[in-house]
């Protein structure tokens, strides 16, 4: 489901796939060929979420932030099942493992892996 919030409506490239059981709210920009799995919550209610082309956000992930913050998933970032990205930047061609938590103001540089849990 895609929801407008306080005048911000998510912008989703037509080639992106948002699973019907995912929730995308507010100030969210989703690029081409992005996959958003079931149970995901992308909450652009307090800040902005930018998901660049060819990213993959697996089942039951949460992407959120503190007020005024931008969460940025750069091109080809992969977010594993159940992970939480809160106020962070994930670099190009990175992988965040299953059930990992990446917190506020963290910058994961390009070509890095964050292990599971």
Image (cartoon, rainbow, N blue to C red):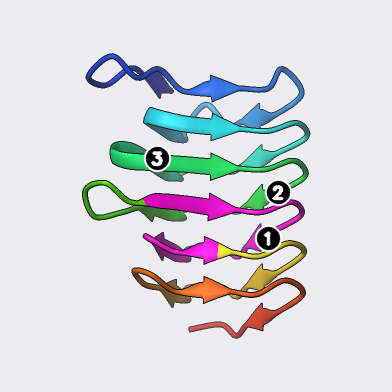
Using residue 108 as the reference point, say whether residue 65 is left or right of it. Answer: left
Q: Residue at x 26, y 46 (%)?
A: 68
Using residue 14 as the reference point, say whether residue 42 is left or right of it. Answer: left
Q: Residues within 10 Å of mark 3 (few under 14, many from 20)?
A: many
In percent of width and height, residue 85 lies at 43, 62
In percent of width and height, residue 96 lies at 60, 72
Q: Quadrant of residue 44?
A: top left
Q: Is residue 38 visible?
A: no
Q: Are marks 2 and 1 in contact (CB under 8 Å)?
A: yes
CA separation in Å, label 3 and label 1: 19 Å
Sequence-earlier tag: 2 or 3: 3
Secondary structure at badge 2 equals loop
Q: Nearer the viewer, mark 2 or mark 3?
A: 3
* Residue annotated with mark 3: 48
CA separation in Å, label 2 and label 1: 6 Å
Sequence-earlier tag: 3 or 1: 3
Q: Quadrant of residue 9?
A: top left
Q: Residue at x 36, y 72 (%)?
A: 103
Q: Nearer the viewer, mark 3 or mark 1?
A: 3
CA separation in Å, label 2 and label 3: 16 Å
Q: Is 80 located above or below residue 28 in the figure?
A: below
The circle drawn on residue 55 is: 2
Q: Residue at x 43, y 23 (%)?
A: 1
Does the magenta segment cover residue 66?
A: no
Q: Are marks 2 and 3 in contact (CB under 8 Å)?
A: no
Q: Nearer the viewer, residue 80 or 20?
A: 80
Sequence-earlier tag: 2 or 1: 2
Secondary structure at badge 3 equals strand
In percent of width and height, residue 102 lies at 43, 73
**Which residues, given as a range, are shown in magenta?**
70-89
In percent of width and height, residue 58 lies at 60, 54
* Residue annotated with mark 1: 78
């Amino acid at each position: 489901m895609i929801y407008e919030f306080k005048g911000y409506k998510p912008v989703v490239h037509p080639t992106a796939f948002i699973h019907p059981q995912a929730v995308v709210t507010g100030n969210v920009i989703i690029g081409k060929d992005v996959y958003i799995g079931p149970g995901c919550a992308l909450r652009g209610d307090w800040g902005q979420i930018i998901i660049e082309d060819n990213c993959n956000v697996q089942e039951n992930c949460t992407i959120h932030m503190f007020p005024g913050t931008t969460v940025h998933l750069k091109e080809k970032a992969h977010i594993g099942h159940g992970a939480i990205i809160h106020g962070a930047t994930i670099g190009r061609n990175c992988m965040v493992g299953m059930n990992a938590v990446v917190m506020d103001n963290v910058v994961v540089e390009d070509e890095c892996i964050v292990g599971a849990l």
